[in-house]
Image (cartoon, rainbow, N blue to C red):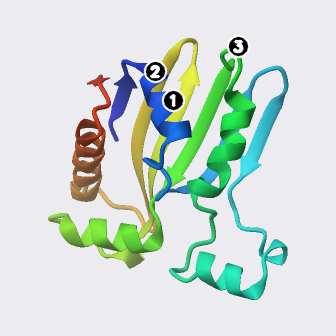
Amino acid sequence: MKAFYIKDQKQFMNRLLKSELFDHFLLAEATIHGAISYNVDGHINQEFFEAEELAALTADGSEYLPFSHFRPICYELIRGKHTPLYMKFVFLLSPANEKKTIASADTVFSAEDVGGMFLNLTFRDGQMILTTGVSYRSFTMDRSLDNAWDTLAARFLNNHGIDFDVR
């Protein structure tokens, strides 16, 4: 697990809310505390969608909605002259991207060993921190996949011009 401290928060928020940069991630959950608090569960409400829409959303086995569906709503909740007091977003790789990531890593793990690969974005007390995480289905001391995920997350941020410190 690595913690990436975002230096230019305004630029990062513009990328998060006004571009497609994070749209390929799934949204597991979101919390925004402003004038009122919003708590979002990213699980797909299957009853809401027509059969074809639901089939497309869950074709790769996902149970969470892509961030692209929540991004416009999130933008409306956050925009304005007041900065939220607190925000937390839990992003998750889609099952297809998780399989690709695991296959590209030099590791003994398979997709069946992993419960999820996460990026957790937290804004609190003026600091914006993006942390990586891997959830395993069983206990392991092997951190090769964690290390590969940390490296890929840093590369993702660097490739998109997001300035950060690692602490």
- The three-letter code of the residue at mark 2 reads Gln
Disc 2 target residue: 9
Q: Are marks 1 and 3 in contact (CB under 8 Å)?
A: no
Residue 108 visible:
no
Residue 9 visible:
yes
- The three-letter code of the residue at mark 3 reads His
Q: Is residue 66 above or below residue 87?
A: below
Q: Are marks 1 and 2 in contact (CB under 8 Å)?
A: yes
Residue occupying the point 56% across, 46% down? 90
Q: Quadrant of residue 37?
A: top right
* Camera-nearest residue between 134 and 80: 80
Q: Is residue 133 above or below residue 26?
A: above
Q: Quadrant of residue 132?
A: top left
- Alpha-carbon span between mark 2 and mark 3: 14 Å
* Camera-nearest residue between 98 and 10: 10
Residue occupying the point 41% across, 74% down? 96
Residue occupying the point 34% across, 73% down? 99
Q: Is residue 156 left or right of residue 28?
A: left
Q: Position of residue 94 (x, y in %)?
A: 47, 67
Disc 3 target residue: 82
Disc 3 is placed on an element classified as loop
Q: Position of residue 63 (x, y in %)?
A: 63, 71
